[in-house]
Amino acid sequence: MASRFLGYAGVAATVLVGLLAAEWAVRLDSTSSYVAFRPAEMTSEDILSAKLNALSDQSGPTAVLVGDSVAYGGIMADHGYDDWRERDLSVAINAELEIAGEELRVANFATNGLTPADTVQVVERSLKAGADAVIIVVGLRGFSNSLNEPDARYTYSWGRPLMGREVSRQANSVWWTKPTTEFLLSAALDGPLKDVLTRLRASDQTEGPVLGTIQLLQVKRRLAELSFDPEQSFQAEAFSRTLSLAEAASVPVVVVYATENERVRPSFIDDAPLAAARDSLEALIDDSRPQITYLGPNPALSADLYVDHMHPTPDGYSVMAKTVAPALIKTLRRGS
């Protein structure tokens, strides 16, 4: 009996040592930096938690870049830029910050399809994790009335009200091994497992000009009805609340307009409604507040700096960074 007990105790001790070693490994500075700064599709609570844990572990000042596919940059992979993670917007901004002699660095917390309602969660939780500044890339799509419908408000389950997920979220903040393991697995597979399987199943489906035309029709339909009134639009209220959260935390915010490819833009929105929508978005942001800077449409983004109707090339991101980085530095100093 005693020998059997000692055997069980030995196994338990081995498992415990293994768990502690894994937890130590995921908390190493090198691991935390990799997880915090590597762009990743935050399709699950675990992947988002892993990045937030890593953000909280950064020793230097860190800003978070938040937004949808325009900020994320992954669409570049579909256009031959296999090294897109070394050439996305956060990397370009960091290059400009380094040239300026700034210690601050930007971590990419953007992900495909992010809505303003999802953005609230990313920004609020990033602030709690110690983010020193926030950059939000926002376009008109997020304010489509179609995204005010209850089943379309959130792209990701972690964006929704908790509804009993508090225990899981708290566990992830204490035991980093579980969420970091999922993050590292998704990095090894170049995406969450379920998304990799989806891509494999869809590999023989429609591509090329036909797909591009379908996407433009979808964009046109979304932009046909836009609302920027927080009292009437769920997404506008969420975006306004995001800015207020950062303001209450005394954290500088730079809002960057996702400039459309002007060569393609007339095919999905006309001049007059575009101008009206841009004016309404600027009024919603209200950058008269000292901690908020708004960068409107960027005329330097010529058509050759896009891979499609909205998403920049690496050179396009470099052009964006040349305005974002100085604005970020100026906003930080204004708020200090």
Image (cartoon, grey):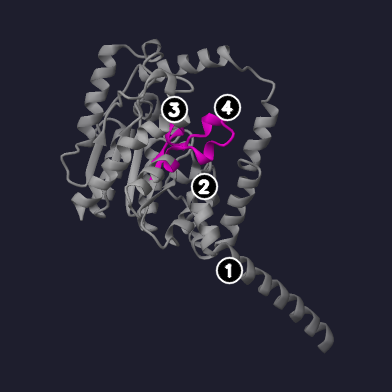
Residue 78 marker? 4
Q: Are marks 3 and 2 in contact (CB under 8 Å)?
A: no
Q: Which residue is mark 1?
A: 24
**What's the amino acid at mark 2?**
Arg
| Label 4: few (<14), some (14–19) or many (≥20) C-alpha neighbours in 10 Å | few
Q: Tell me which segment is drawn in magenta.
A: 65-91
Precedes in sequence: disc 1 or disc 2: 1
Q: Is residue 1 visible from the viewing direction of this image?
A: no
Q: Quadrant of the N terminus?
A: bottom right
Expressed as whole percent of the image width and height from the top left, the position of residue 77 reads 57, 31
Precedes in sequence: disc 4 or disc 2: 2
Q: CA distance from mark 4 to mark 2?
A: 18 Å
The residue depicted at 54 percent of the width and 60 percent of the height is 30
Q: Which residue is mark 3?
A: 312
Expressed as whole percent of the image width and height from the top left, the position of residue 53 reads 48, 58
Q: Is residue 332 visible from the viewing direction of this image?
A: yes
Q: CA distance from mark 1 to mark 3?
A: 39 Å
Precedes in sequence: disc 3 or disc 4: 4
Q: Which residue is mark 2?
A: 38
| Label 1: few (<14), some (14–19) or many (≥20) C-alpha neighbours in 10 Å | few
The picture quadrant where one finds residue 110 is top left
